[in-house]
Image (spheres, rainbow, N blue to C red):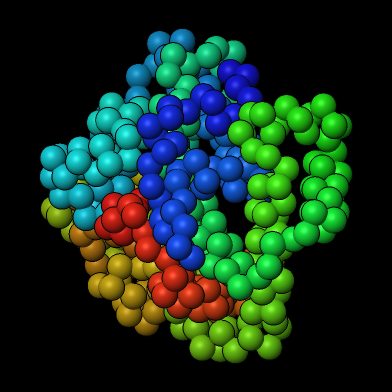
Amino acid sequence: MNQTPRLQVLPEDWLNLPAFEAGGRSFLFRDVLQAAAVRGNLDSFLQQTVRAWQAMAQAQESGLESERTSVEALMEEYRYERDLVSAEETERWLERWGLTPEDFLDYFTRQYWVNCDSGSGISGPDLEPPEWSNLWIADMVLSGEWVRWARQLATEVVCGLDVQPASTEGMQPLLDRFKQGRGWSEGTWAQWLTDWELQPARVAEILRRQEIVQNRQRKALSPSARELVVDEQRMALVRVDLEVVGFDSEEAAKEGYSCAVSDGLSLELVARESGYTLEHRSFFLRDLPDGLKMAVLSAYPGAILPPHPEGGMVDVYRVVRHTEPTLADPEVSGAIDAILIQRHFGDLESREVRWLMNGDSLP
């Protein structure tokens, strides 16, 4: 699939849906995607979309069928996290985003096949999917990327409310740096403007806002501020490495737990002999279900925890290790930065932005 990202492949009625209001202006889905294109968010995202579609297409060409229970588990987990209890609620939620139940199923089928890739790479057939625009919309919405881009644009808008627009002379250096950073010729630049239905002045406005946010972020993410949040969030950001076996019934989980605790069998052997899968998972303590947090934190490495029901399965965990948070850990560093950014910009967003897509409908 060789699809150049451009605005024209998406339906006008979807692009013209209202996203939010800020500073007395309304912003559409179109504006969100244009800002994402300027920010450089789209190319890597669309590569992931292509890869997932190719994984599914390759499997279909090979006559393989997905494990229905695995795909349904992915869908159920997604619905559970968003409190979409019934099929009717899910259908209404999808409709607000311009999606259908078939789009929902196809998205998680693609995720299933791309997750099955062993790392050997997916070459997939070089075919055009029949509904590229639906594929792109489903991936943007259901992955949560569209919401992330919308919030980035909202932050850029509110941070730029009190800033005077760049003069004509001030615009050109912004545009020159942008083109040079992309390595574009004038012809490529002109085609990109056409693909995204943008004018140079509008690109300069977007770039100016993004520059303001980057400057404010640098100030918010000072070394001293980051160290303070590490201390404040020390328990929440303890990393917990676990082995877990998900059993399909409470009886099976109790039997597996008993074999591991009473008979001294490893959880790996219990899983293999009972036909279940052992997974290795790493969490921040804050991200564990409430019923597990204290049990995991108080358990010594090697301890096996009693069965815990979760998402339709009954899990048995073995605690591998606890690791104290440090800024040298990229995931800890990212979590700290996200907290500081939310504190810095969150209040501003709540005061200045009115979301036109109901907050409960955001993925």
Q: Position of residue 320 (x, y in %)?
A: 47, 67
Question: How many numbered discs, if any?
Answer: 0
Q: Position of residue 133 (x, y in %)?
A: 46, 25
Residue 139 position by quadrant: top left
User: Which residue shows up at 71% across the image and 71% down it?
Assistant: 215
Residue 156 position by quadrant: bottom right
Taking depth in this image into account, of 190 and 350 the one nearest to the observer is 190
Please state if 42 lies on the left or on the right of 311 as rendered: right
Taking depth in this image into account, of 289 and 34 the one nearest to the observer is 34
Above or below residue 238? Residue 63 is: above
- Furthest residue to the front? 168
User: Which residue shows up at 15% across the image and 39% down it?
Assistant: 87
Please state if 251 lies on the left or on the right of 141 as rendered: left
Above or below residue 16? Residue 240 is: below
Residue 352 position by quadrant: bottom left
Is residue 205 at all visible to an observer of this figure? yes
Is residue 315 at all visible to an observer of this figure? no
Above or below residue 264? Residue 275 is: above
Please state if 114 lies on the left or on the right of 71 as rendered: right
Q: Work out which quarter of the rendered image holds the N terminus and state it.
A: top right
Taking depth in this image into account, of 158 and 60 the one nearest to the observer is 158
Q: Position of residue 213 (x, y in %)?
A: 65, 67
Taking depth in this image into account, of 129 and 275 the one nearest to the observer is 129
User: Which residue shows up at 82% across the image and 27% down it?
Assistant: 187
User: Which residue shows up at 61% across the image and 33% down it?
Assistant: 197
